[in-house]
Amino acid sequence: MPKRLEAFLRNQLYFEWIDTDGISNKKQFLMMYNLEVIRSRGGSRRDRRGSQSSLRKLKNDWSNIESLNELKSIADADTKEFLEYFSKAFKKIISENVHKFTLIKLDPIHLETIEDALIWLDAFSHNSLERVAITDKIRRSWQQNQYRKTSGKKQKSFDLPESTIKSLKKLANTNNLTETDVITILINEELKNDIYIKEVLNRANAIQRAINGE
């Protein structure tokens, strides 16, 4: 039986890890286990009809969960490194929102396959929009991290006057470049030619001397 299905069935009622070692048909056992727990809540005919309805709901829930795979775009070659990053990022999100996710049990403890990561997502939410939100956030962060590693680039943030930001955007749009490309070109050209900064400083010094009457 797929590990993900087993985890789904184990966690439906009590978030317990039921020992199924030595059981040949784990899927049938776990489905019946859930059914018997439901039945134990009452023995009337109505209760039994309700338990059958609950079992059908269990099957439908699994069918919906099984169709969700927000990580299918991760290439095989990137799996190990991505899972290490996903593990840290996911735990960080959970730890920052413990008030909301107190019932989440992260089994298995270590992620070895994409299926393991999906098991964590199943414990997190059955809602497609919530799952996409968290996986997209982690995937974008990971991709940026990968890009910086392969390109030799590092992220840098700084404040600019609003007028400078507008000028930067205008230069980028006019020349069909990114804003990063514009900044890189201007810095490299200034290092090579050593013109504009000196010119601006000399002009500023001349104005200051004129003000001082020198």
Image (cartoon, helix red, strand yellow):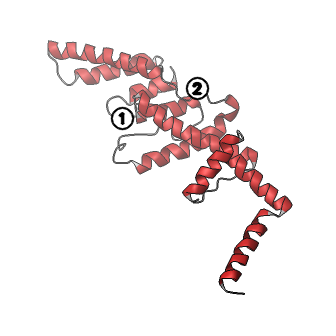
Residue 210 place in picture, x, y as percent: 69, 81
Residue 22 in view, yes or no: no
Residue at mark 2 to residue at mark 1: CA–CA distance: 26 Å
Residue drawn at x 55%, y 29% as measured from the top left: 115
Q: Secondary structure at mark 1?
A: loop
Look at the image and tell me in which quarter the C terminus lies: bottom right
The mark lying in front, picked from 2 and 1, is 2
Q: Quadrant of residue 111?
A: top right
Residue drawn at x 43%, y 45% as measured from the top left: 94
Residue 53 place in picture, x, y as percent: 26, 14
Residue drawn at x 75%, y 50% as measured from the top left: 152
**Would you place residue 113 above or below residue 160 in this image?**
above
Residue 85 in view, yes or no: yes
Q: Secondary structure at mark 2?
A: loop
Q: Is residue 43 left or right of residue 31?
A: left
What is the three-letter code of the residue carrying label 1? Phe
Q: 1 or 171: which is nearer to us?
A: 171
Q: Quadrant of residue 46?
A: top left
Q: Which residue is mark 2?
A: 72
Q: Which residue is mark 1?
A: 15
Q: N-terminal of the two: label 2 or label 1?
A: 1
Q: 207 or 14: which is nearer to us?
A: 207
